Image (spheres, rainbow, N blue to C red):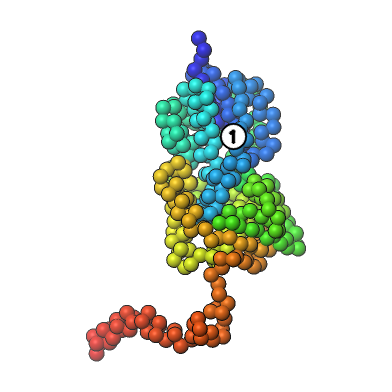
Amino acid sequence: MAKDKVILAYSGGLDTSIIIPWLKENYDYDVIAVCGDVGQGKETDGLDERAKKAGASKLYIEDLRDEYVEDFIFPTLKAGAVYEGKYLLGTSHARPIIARRLVEIAKQEGAVAICHGATGKGNDQVRFELTIKALAPELKIIAPWRIWDIKSREDAVDYAEAHNIDIPVTKKDLYSRDRNIWHISHEGMDLEDPANEPQLDSLLKLGVSPEKAPDKPTYVTIGFEKGVPVSLDGKKIAPRPLVEKLNELGGKNGIGIADIVEDRLVGMKSRGVYETPGGTILYTAIQELEYLCLDRDTQAFKRQAAIKFAELVYDGKWYTPLREALSEMVDSMEETVTGEVRLKLYKGCAIPAGAKSPYSLYNEDIASFGDSHELYSHKDSEGFINLFGLPLKVRAMMKNRFDK
């Protein structure tokens, strides 16, 4: 009889490499590995051989990079979503697109279950499983880290060695890393103590520390249409190459390094170092353009909505009515966010160096220190201040009555 099939979210890293033999030992499943390529780079090299050597019957490597940038990264960017003021959600919005492809292949293969290598202490277990529940509630979910006897990454290395499984780490370098086209995260080892300064020169993968960045600044001009970046230095460019180029420029200039102690969804705090060079540049640029193009009330409400949007993405709630509704609202708000922003990249900083838009709400005739009688007179402010300050004046008069 043919065995039941399980789809494994496979990265080729330590955890998912040892899960293949573990699944075969404990479930006797036909293991089909699926790697969602969201920009891991060379990490996908040789995966087919490694997966099959570990016991998988088949490996899918799915190129999701363009879709990831256009349908997940850019909507989050447009929303201005940043988790807890620092984290640009690089791992968070990669999970729903990967999980969606797992579901699609599970249905195609007639699989009965999906397995992932996320730990029982992290957020990714929630992100994978909420997507699966939203798109295929009938599928069984297997999460080995919640049920097996392996308790640490050191134990996982021992298991791999005992089963002759090739792994890309050693006990001397057990940082937990997640890389995609948007960022790379670093967790574990010496970073687990928030008192330790990150050793950037040995840690960083996408760029250099600010101290090692060039002494001469780099200027870049980014063009936007309705809140979507579409050009670099006046030349049209597709979304994925745009992000890749900004990652290169930002990395060379030491931009986008964030040391974070964040609140995980599961209730604990965790410490990590994130590299998001291109993303940091884009968030800075779009905010500068919004200063020009959005009115005060819209900006204020958008900032509030961005907090909720970030929480939804962080918590794995991409496929929810609220996230979809917020994205539609943001699309409407960004209708006039079109123009160009020039930035100076210098030693870890993305410094605004000018912006322009055909929809700019900045009016020099009004803003000038000179008196423009047709649009605004200095004398107009007296009546405005009297009305605006009336509650304060009335309260002061009341207090004076009682003080006497």
Q: Position of residue 59 (x, y in %)?
A: 61, 25
The total number of labels drawn is 1
Residue displayed at 54% across by 86% down: 371
Judge from the rendering whether residue 294 lies leftward or rightward of residue 400; answer left or right.
right
Q: Quadrant of residue 351?
A: bottom right
SS class of the residue under badge 1? strand
Q: Position of residue 92 (x, y in %)?
A: 52, 44
Residue nearest the observer in this picture, 339 or 136: 339
Q: Outermost residue, top direction?
A: 1
Whether residue 176 is visible: yes
Q: Position of residue 105 (x, y in %)?
A: 53, 27
Residue displayed at 58% across by 42% down: 68
Q: Position of residue 40 (x, y in %)?
A: 64, 39
Name the residue type under label 1: Gly
Q: Outermost residue, front direction?
A: 374
Residue displayed at 46% across by 51% down: 328
Residue nearest the observer in this picture, 68 or 41: 68
Residue nearest the observer in this picture, 56 or 151: 56
Residue nearest the observer in this picture, 151 or 225: 225
Residue highlighted by disc 1: 36
Whether residue 188 is visible: no
